[in-house]
Amino acid sequence: MNHKPQAGKLVSIAPGIRRLTASNPGPMTGPGTNSYIVGYGPFAIIDPGVDDPAHLERLLTACDGELIGLLLTHRHSDHVGGVPELARRSGAWIGAFEKTTLGSYDAPLRVDRPLIDGERLELGGVRLDVLHTPGHAADHLCFLASESGLLFAGDSVMADVTVVILPPDGSMTDYMTTLNRLAAIPMRHIAPGHGRLLDDPAATIAGIMAHRRDREAQVLNALEAIPMKPDTIAARLYPELDSQLLPMAAAQVEAHLIRLGEVGAARHDAAGWQRTR
Ligand SMILES: [Zn+2]
């Protein structure tokens, strides 16, 4: 069951939990966005995914007319594009972390049920604990099905794809805090927003943290005593990179620079970023 997800194929991954992957593969989305159907009936869906009629139809069929709730890990369109249509057709409530200032990649959505950290939900016979896990997005939530030891990680942890942190809604400092917190929670598997089910949560999270620390060290090393712009640093760090992907890489570098600024290793003014020591 841990193979790369196949779009359109409904897969049971734990008692009361099924996965349906949308057909939006890409460099940022891996094989496509994973929607998870939770419960033995009635049902809730974590991340309905893109607004693709075939995907939404499959979700509705899997819920057999008993879809009561839509749980959102965050508001990026690859996770929530299908929410308005699915809510309209099923009457399901929309549950998300409340957010007053939307990030540039957020879809504006009605929230019927504001979810908060530490809250416990009972959905069709499955218990889910709500965790506020900012980093990828300020409103990011993960859901823990403690009975099966399964963490629905959204875009906090992905399989085989690096999580993108785009400031200011994304924060590298928050992301590292989130990873530390997740590392301390007992769990058996991670069900990510993109990609296959992950069987070794501790090693996966430790690997992501090590990767981020390496990147941070690279960015710090690239800094000089004269101010530099994030795109100059990105071009220097990734000389092979496709020029179309450079703005995204520059945003990642900037996320690391902001964190380096927060810990006092870098500073910036209008001219750019430089090292402090
Ligand atoms: Zn995503």
Image (spheres, rainbow, N blue to C red):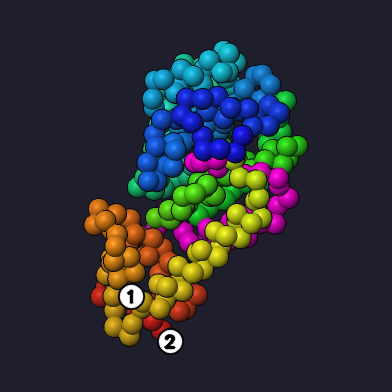
Q: Type of residue at label 1?
A: Trp
One can see residue 12 in this view: yes
Find residue 54 and report its horizontal and vertical position in percent.
41, 20
Give left or right: position of 238 versus 153.
left
One can see residue 116 in this view: no
SS for dot 1:
strand
Q: Type of residue at label 2?
A: Arg
Find residue 191 and report its horizontal and vertical position in percent.
59, 40
Find residue 71 and report its horizontal and vertical position in percent.
55, 33
| Residue shown at the point (68%, 26%) measured from the top left | 16
SS for dot 2:
loop
From this view, report whether residue 253 is shown above or below residue 245: below
Q: Nearer the viewer, residue 199 or 173?
A: 199
Asked if the beta carbon under badge 1 is closer than 8 A to the nearest atom of ligand 1, the reply is no
**Magenta-drawn segment:** 167-196
Circle 1 sits on which residue? 273
Q: Which mark is residue 103?
A: none
Give left or right: position of 55 versus 36.
left
Image quadrant of residue 269? bottom left
